[in-house]
Image: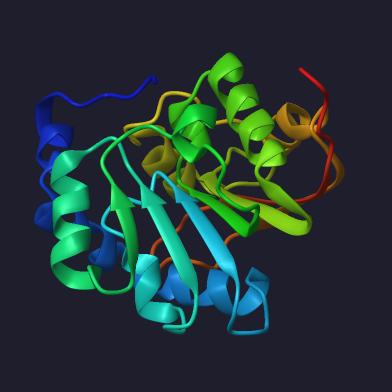
Amino acid sequence: MAQIVTGIRSVLSNPRVYNLVQNLFGARKARRLIVSSYFPAHDHYRMLDIGCGTAEILEFLPETVEYYGFDASEDYIRQARQRFGHRGVFRAELVRNATLGDMPPFDLILAFGLLHHLDDDEATGLFELAASHLHPEGCLLTVDPVFCTGQGPVARWIIGKDRGQNIRRRDSYAGLAANHFEKIEAIERHDLLHIPYSHCILRCQKPIVRSP
């Protein structure tokens, strides 16, 4: 996983500081818009959140959602349990096929702000894992910063300072999913935060599951 965690960026490893900075930039607005625009319209579904951070997405979800959140940071997961412990299952570990074991398939898999921390091989592995554990009628949703044509200099500069070192263009994000999903919708949005910023949202459906 390629990311910068030294210098000023190191303070973002603290979950309270991370959430404060995120909210100053408008992360709550982004989560609200993502949920209202792209999440299932009904209230009963199984959700896997890969790289869930402090699980702040739960603020905008009905309590009937069956939620599983995974993150590599023990500090982030500890914070998630303190606030949302009654709302789901939280595990401080990387998601692997063995980790999910014989769990029933998920209706929604979310990777919010994760792909741009992964190199191409790691990202392809994530799409393969998601396709293997998604319900045939389910959806994988990814949200990441993106470099795009016509992007303003301020947005480009801010995005370039991200901890993640694999920020891509929209077609490059979509291409990583092509071997594992039949239907891929790649959406650019520039209105999710309070600051100039561009996101690429992938909606991946109809998973392709290959025999081992």
Q: In this view, does 53 lie above or below 44?
A: above
* Residue located at (48% from left, 82% from top): 64
Answer with the quarter of the image where residue 146 lies: top right
At x 11% / y 26%, what residue is drawn?
A: 7
Rendered location of residue 145, percent (x, y): 51, 44
10 or 39: nearer the viewer: 39
Q: In which quarter of the image is the C terminus?
A: top right
Residue nearer the viewer, 84 or 171: 84
Image colouring: rainbow
Q: Is residue 146 left or right of residue 211?
A: left
Residue positioned 63% across, 71% down in the render = 39
In the rendered view, does 129 fall on the left or right side of 61?
right
Whether residue 24 is visible, yes or no, is yes
The residue lying toward the viewer, choosing from 196 and 165, is 165
**In the depicted structure, whether residue 4 falls above or below residue 89:** above
**x, y percentage for residue 8?**
12, 34
Seen in the image, is 11 located left or right of residue 67? left
